[in-house]
Image (cartoon, rainbow, N blue to C red):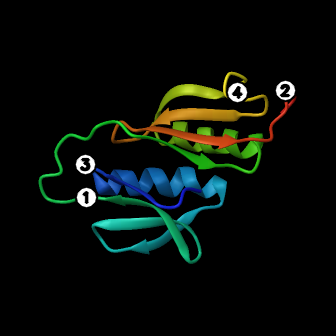
Amino acid sequence: MIDHFGINCADLDAAKSFYDAVLEPLGFARQMDYGVAVGYGVPGHPDFWISTFDGVGANRENHFAFTAPDAAHVRAFYDAAIAQGAESLHEPRLWPEYHEHYYGAFVRDPDGNNVEAVCHTANAGD
């Protein structure tokens, strides 16, 4: 995962629904929920946070990548995101311009952020 990263969301309920769905295939889940802030990760490590506040306003796009153990999990993340209505930015594939085994998929979340799942061990046959 990431050693914590937080974003502000215009619609926290939509964001919770989205992240509950797309992080589950990667083995991450809600670890803490304070109503206006929710931490995701593995038990004892809420590394990714979504939150809101009165007057949050328009957000700038953020990009962040979640770790996936292999290409199958990247595809599961992508499929879950599309099922949640996310915009596809880039379908799962190898990105040799980054490095030989970089396999990632990119979607836009409900707040317009560029969200990626990536593994660094994929092969052309994955």
Q: Compare marks 3 and 1 and give the one earlier in the sequence.
A: 3
Extreme residue in the top direction = 97
What's the distance in space between the residues labelled 3 and 2, CA to CA? Answer: 39 Å
Q: CA distance from mark 3 to mark 4?
A: 30 Å
* Quadrant assignment for the C terminus: top right
**Cα distance in 3D space between marks 3 and 1:** 7 Å
Type of the residue with mark 4:
Arg
Residue occupying the point 38% across, 52% down: 15
Disc ID at residue 93:
4
Q: Which comes before the other along the chain, label 4 or label 2?
A: 4
Marks 4 and 1, Cα distance to the nearest angstrom?
33 Å
Q: CA distance from mark 1 to mark 2?
A: 41 Å
Residue 100 image point, x, y percent = 78, 28
Q: Amino acid at mark 2?
A: Ala
Q: Nearer the viewer, residue 101 or 58?
A: 101
- Tell me whether the residue at label 3 lies in contact with that at label 1, contact meaning CB atoms closer than 8 angstroms: yes
Whether label 1 touches label 2, CB < 8 Å: no
- Name the residue beneath numbered marker 3: 10
Label 2 neighbourhood size at 10 Å, few (<14), some (14-19), many (20+)? few
Q: Nearer the N terminus, badge 4 or badge 1?
A: 1
Amino acid type of disc 3?
Ala
Assess whether mark 1 and mark 4 are in contact (beta carbons under 8 angstroms).
Answer: no
Q: Alpha carbon of mark 4 to alpha carbon of mark 2: how far? A: 9 Å
Q: Which residue is mark 2?
A: 124
When asked about the image quadrant of residue 92, the answer is top right
Q: Which mark is first along the chain, 2 or 3?
A: 3
Residue behind mark 1: 52
Closer to the camera: disc 3 or disc 2?
2
Return the x and y of residue 31 as percentages of the image width and height: 50, 72
Report x, y in % for residue 54.
13, 58
Q: Residues within 10 Å of mark 4 (few under 14, many from 20)?
A: some
